[in-house]
Image: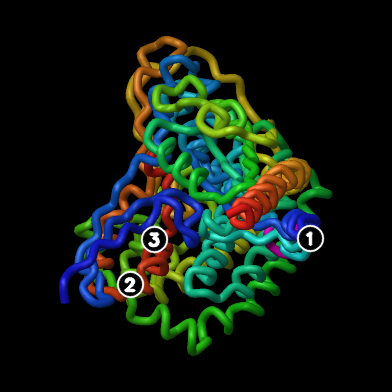
Amino acid sequence: MKRLINTSRVKSPWLIHFDCGSCNGCDIEVLACLTPVYDIERFGILNVGNPKHADILVVTGTVNHRNKKALKNVYDQMPEPKVVVAVGACGTTGGIFREAYNVVGGVDKIIPVDAYVSGCAAKPEAIIDGVVIALGKLAEKGKKVDQGIFERLENTQNFIKSR
Amino acid sequence: MARTVIPFGPQHPVLPEPLHLTLTVEDEIVKEAIPKLGYVHRGLEKLAEIRDHTQMIQIVERVCGICSTLHAMCYCQGIEALMNVEVPPRAKFLRVIWAEMHRMHSHLLWLGLFADAFGFESLFMQFWRIRERIMDLQEATSGNRVIVSVNCVGGVKRDIDAEMEKWILDTMKIVEREVLQLKSTIMDDFTVKRRTVGIGVLSKEKAYEMGAAGPTLRASGIAQDMRQTGYAAYSELNFEPVVETDGDCYARTVCRFNEVFQAIDLIREAFAKLPQSELAVKAKGLPNGEVVSRVEQPRGECLYYLKGTGSKYLDRVRIRTPTFANIPPLLEMLPGCDLADVPVLILTIDPCISCTER
């Protein structure tokens, strides 16, 4: 049962895309991954609109003082296990805008990031590669989370029996 | 019924970009819409103080990834006017070719997203499939799929050779045929028409009064297009703005759809008239004085105000983008529409939030 949950989670991850302060270049490339030429939906990767359904958070663009709360909010709403992919030069470090007054920096200043995708704008192939790297980490995190759940369940059952 | 307040965005499945609207609804009818902006504000204009006027080209290209080359073109035209540089004729025509390729990719992207807004996902996929052909051309001619960095002060950095020219013209034929195949779906389909015809009507007077720009303005019957001013090589090309008169969502769709074909025609004509000359002239001196430079982006008129004081760094860069002009007409359209039509109406002005907030 444990293994089944984890395998299906990694084989068909759902991702949510959040635009943080991007110039749209990376956004349209993330969308281009879903369209017929690259078509990651055939591998079961689905773009969803609700953070509560998602396993992977794909963030494009720099973080600024206004949207950092929104980014944190989206991240906190996602259920465990979750991984974050920072896309583009802006998402990883702040890129060409890092010296601008309203820019905080890369996504990792606000939330933990598991995979970085470089490029300005990042190519769809690179984004898919980044998501695949993140999937490996999702499997590891998934094992830990599942272990915790089953241990807790067992403890509760033992506690009830002992009463 | 009591009024309900519904927040729309900043993270919303329809929009790839963070735009926040506070909608006040009564039953299913929107009564009031208040936008909240600033989620993408980076402060690009201020960067002119620490980057010199040639480095700023790379910055303004990243104002918006969808119309990158047009931002750079507008900026370079301004700097060239300040430094009294005459651009070689071949560079002018090449700028037109890249600008029109960008317009095609932007309009196909919009047509796809618009189809997705009313739930027609297979049409979205079809338009984006066609768009990939143009992305391939952009990658082959400039080295990057999205940020087409070809403009420099005094001309362009890259050339399009005869082999590439043939490939581009062949692709134009294929794109024209494939887009025509989708024409009956987006224009004559009963379901699509129910979602677009008569929705969000913007009258000619209101559009003018509110200062709308681009296809939003032209769909209301006003033939205003910055390409009429004849910047770059547009003065030597046959050009008539595409105008629709109804001012509803359907008219705006038809307007953008026809502009795709207009862009194909302009590329063909530009290649037929492409003169032989050098690609760029060396710009001497430093920018001094004030200038206003305007180009027509896929979304409408874009305005750059540049002020130089004779040093390497510009004193002021002010960018006014088309979406900024189109938000007041959007707020005029929203009250009175159904809640389900809100995503369609927002997309119909082709919002580019990163342009607006910079």
Tell me: B206 left or right of A82: left
Residue occupying image coordinates x 28% and y 76%: B28
- Magenta-tinted stretch: A34-38
Q: Secondary structure at mark 2?
A: helix
Q: Is residue B207 in view?
A: yes
Is B98 magenta? The answer is no
Q: Which residue is mark 3?
A: B349
Q: Chain of mark 3?
A: B
Q: Position of residue B108 (x, y in %)?
A: 58, 63
Q: Main secondary structure of the magenta part?
A: loop
Q: Which residue is mark 2?
A: B339
Q: Which residue is mark 1?
A: A4
- Alpha carbons under labels 2 and 3: distance apart: 17 Å
Residue occupying image coordinates x 80% and y 56%: A3
Quadrant in the picture for residue B310: top left
Check the image and name the residue furthest to the top: B311
Identity of the amino acid at label 1?
A: Leu
Tell me: B207 left or right of A7: left
